[in-house]
Structure formats: structure tokens, C-alpha cells
Amino acid sequence: MVDPMETTNDIRLLLAVLAPLIGAGLVMATGKKPNVREACSALAALTLFGIIASLVPDVLAGKRLVCTVFNLLPNLSFTLRADALSMVFALAASFLWVLTVFYSAGYMRGLHEHDQTRFNTCFALALFGAIGTALSDNLLTMYLFYEIVSVCTYPLVAHHQDEESYAGAQKYMVYLTTTAKGLILPAMVLIYVLSGTLDFATNVHTGIIPAAANDCVVTILYACCILGFAKNGIMPLHSWLPSAMVAPTPVSALLHAVAVVKVGVFSTVRVMLYVFGVDRMDALNVGMPTAYFVSITIVVASIIALSKDNLKARLAYSTVSQLSYVILGVALLKPSGVEGGLIHIANHAFSKITLFFCAGAIYVATHKKNISEMHGLGRVMPITFGAFALASLSMIGAPPVGGFVTKWYLLNGAMDAGSLGILLVLLASTLLNTAYFAPVVYHGFFGKPNPSDAGHHYHEAPPAMVIPLTVTAVISVLIGIYPNFFMRFVQAIYPT
């Protein structure tokens, strides 16, 4: 067996980061030929996924793969790294990009959207930032890629170029760049001064903060990191996320399932586990306060979701709520809780992208955005609403879909931590999830069609959209029935 601490230099990490960047260049170069342009997007996505998949055997064998691009200062470099936590995010993001490329082509062509070349270019650049974040070996590298994601997704949010989209994009940028520069950047400088390095620790127990560092200072740094990565959607720094729903649905799917919000929660838990470490967090007694703090987001965002008639708005607040499951699980500082939180990075990705894919398919087929207008549509769009039902079960946490695995481990983590309050939060959130998802499915299949639909002959969206949402829905079930693939990575992060 390979020594779990063995480090291997591997150029594939750099190739993985460059694949979407080169893909973006090819998309720009072939913009006047739509079929060639989209073929370049698909090729870049497939190449990226192939490279990430090729890393799996080495990471599962216990190797930590690294690739130093250049050095800046002593113990400070631009370095990439693949470990178990990297793979949970990178595998989900790279695979879902493949499906999103095909879905996006059907959506954008179906609505005859403008500036599709710019759209596809920025899409690829956003994945460049997301994969770079996943494969970062230190806080500086991760911060740089985190900011790249923010900049490259601005044109996507502002795609429609009207007053509403510009306002949403402006709020998006103000929230994300202000918190990153105002909290993360100074915290990163101080961490370097205290530790002499920004490299992530090799295990989740030790962290990199010296034991002699003042506890009050370390606690402040911890709070800066939790709030500074505002892409994680924690209240009260969450309102950029619903505002960004003015973007086209493929962008919403990218924001909520693949790149932006996952970059936020991934960065947050990477810092919690590999900068501060479980032992230091436990000694500072910041774990349970963090869990209760994000519990407010879980419950309040779910209550707000109940009030939203616009389907994408309801899904947006669902995302705000669901993201905090990841942080809550890690904050429990128990193996089961950490595993439940981290596995939710993948489980939520497949389920939430299915929900947004379905929302986009409904809009392309019927031009309906509001849930109150969708009564009876499930009978004419059974595949789309069936996929929505399966993904909803995952969000609720019902077996046999992936979200059940998340809830099972989180419940066990809460019991191991002896926290009745967190158990009640998880129960309340499950009931609220049911309350805002079940009506969409019920009225879709059993509701009486709206009188305004008389004379309309609706049908499923184009196959380029229906096939990807079917695939993601099926996978969300498979990772619930057979969770071992992602769980092997998660259990390697915090072995029991």
C-alpha cells in the first residue's frame, strides 16, 4: 500500500486547469460557426473530465498529487494539488460541465439567445476558475481562482443586458468581491505572518496555525474566513444569489450546482479543515457555534422559499439553505458529520442541477416561470416533471436518492455531537423542503390545467435538454443507492 503521505509531482493537474482555458480560446476563435463552437465546448469539457477521472486511481491509492507552477516568496507558491477533497468537487464539476454544454446548446438555440459565443466563453472560464479552486494547494492559489470565478461569471449574470440583469450582476460583484477583499485578503496575510506558509495541511487534524498563536486572533481569522467566502450563501451575505437568477437557466444551473456556490462552500470547508484543523477548532470551541449559526440560514431560507411563486426563485432559496448543510456537517467536528457535509457537495450538485435543468426545460417548452402557472404540465411533460420529482426527493432527503445519504450522516453526526438542537434543525428543514417541493410535483401531475392553457399543445423540451436532465436525475438516484464511489474519497478525508 502506498504511504498516505506520499507526494507525487504530476503535470496532469496543470493540464486539467488549462483544458477549460484553452476551450474558452477555441470557442472565441470559432464563434462565427455555431456547430464548431459548441463542438469545441464539448471537447474541452470531455477533456477536462477525462483528465480528472485519470487522477482517481492515484488519489484512492493514497497519493497526494502536486504541481508547482511558480514560486513567489519563501513557502509561498502557485501550486496545484489533488487529494480526496479535491476529487469530490472536481469530479462532480467536470462531469456536470459535459452535460451542461449539451443542455445549454438546446436552451440557447431554443430561445434564440444573443451573444452565444460570449456566453460559452465565459462558461468555460468559470469552469477554469472552479477547477483551479478545487485543485489549489494553498490559500493564495485558491483565492486567485476564487476571484477568477467571480469575474468570469459577471457577464453570464448580466447576459440579457437589461436593467434587471445589470442590477443583479452589480449586486453579485459587490457582495463577492467586497467580502473577499475585505475579509479573506487581510486574513490570508495575517495567517502567512503567523504561520510562515499558506500551504494547506496534509490532514484535517493539525491545520497550519501555530499552537502559540493567540486564541482570540485565531478566532477572528476563523470568522473572517467563514463570512469572507460569501459564495457559500450564509445569511446575511446571501442576497446576491437570488438576485443572480435573472441570468439564463444554464447559468443558474452553473451558479447553483457546479461552479459558483460550490466554490464558496468548498473554499470554506477547505479552510476549516486544512488551515484551522479539527483539533484547533475544537480547542477554540467554534464548531457548535458555527453549526448553530448556519442553522439559521438552513431554516430561514427554507421559509422564504415557501413564499416564492417563481420556480427559479424558490430553487435559489433552496440553494441558500442546502449549502449550509455542508458547513454544518463539518462544524460538528465528528467523522459522521464531516462525511455527511462533504458528500453533500456531490449529492447536491447532481440534484440541484436537475431541478434547474427542469425549470429551463419548462420555460423553453411553455414560457412559464411561475409555479401557479404549471398546473397539469406534468401530464404533457412527464419526463421533465418526473426528473424534478426525483431531484426533489434528494433535496428532501428521502431514500433512495442521494440526499438521503447526506441526511443520514448528518443525523448521525448530530447524535455523536450530542446536539438535540441540530437534530431538530435537520428535522425542521426536511419538513420545510417537503412543503416547498411537493406542491410543484403534485400540481404538475394532478393539478387542473389553467384556463389560459386551453388550445395550447405543450410537449417536452428539445432532446438536447431532456436527455441531460434525465441523466442527472438518474445519477442522483444511483449515488443514493450506491454511495460508495464518492464516500471512498470522503472517508479518506476524515477516517474513523
Image (cartoon, rainbow, N blue to C red):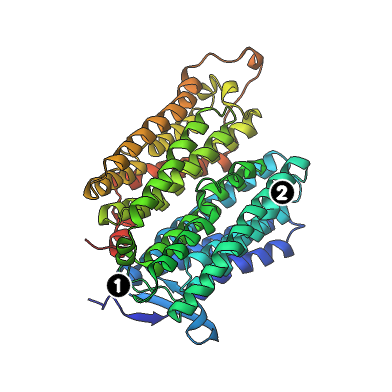
Q: Quadrant of the N terminus?
A: bottom left
Question: Looking at the image, which residue sits at the far bottom?
Answer: 74
In the displayed structure image, the side of residue 121 where residue 93 appears, left or right: left
Q: In which quarter of the image is residue 249?
A: top right
Q: Which residue is drawn at 52% across and 32% down?
A: 304
Dot 2, crowdedness within 10 Å: few (<14), some or many (≥20)? many
In the displayed structure image, the side of residue 148 where residue 57 appears, left or right: left
In the displayed structure image, the side of residue 416 where residue 203 appears, left or right: right
Closer to the camera in the image, 430 or 26: 430
In the image, residue 439 lies at what x, y percent?
A: 47, 23
In the picture of the structure, the residue carrying the numbered disc 1 is: 62
Q: In which quarter of the image is residue 146?
A: bottom right
On screen, 429 above or below 217?
above
Q: Residue 275: in sight, yes or no?
A: yes
Report if the CB atoms under discs 1 and 2 are less than 8 Å apart: no
Residue 212 numbered mark, or none:
none
Q: What element carries label 1?
A: loop
In the picture of the structure, the residue carrying the numbered disc 2 is: 158
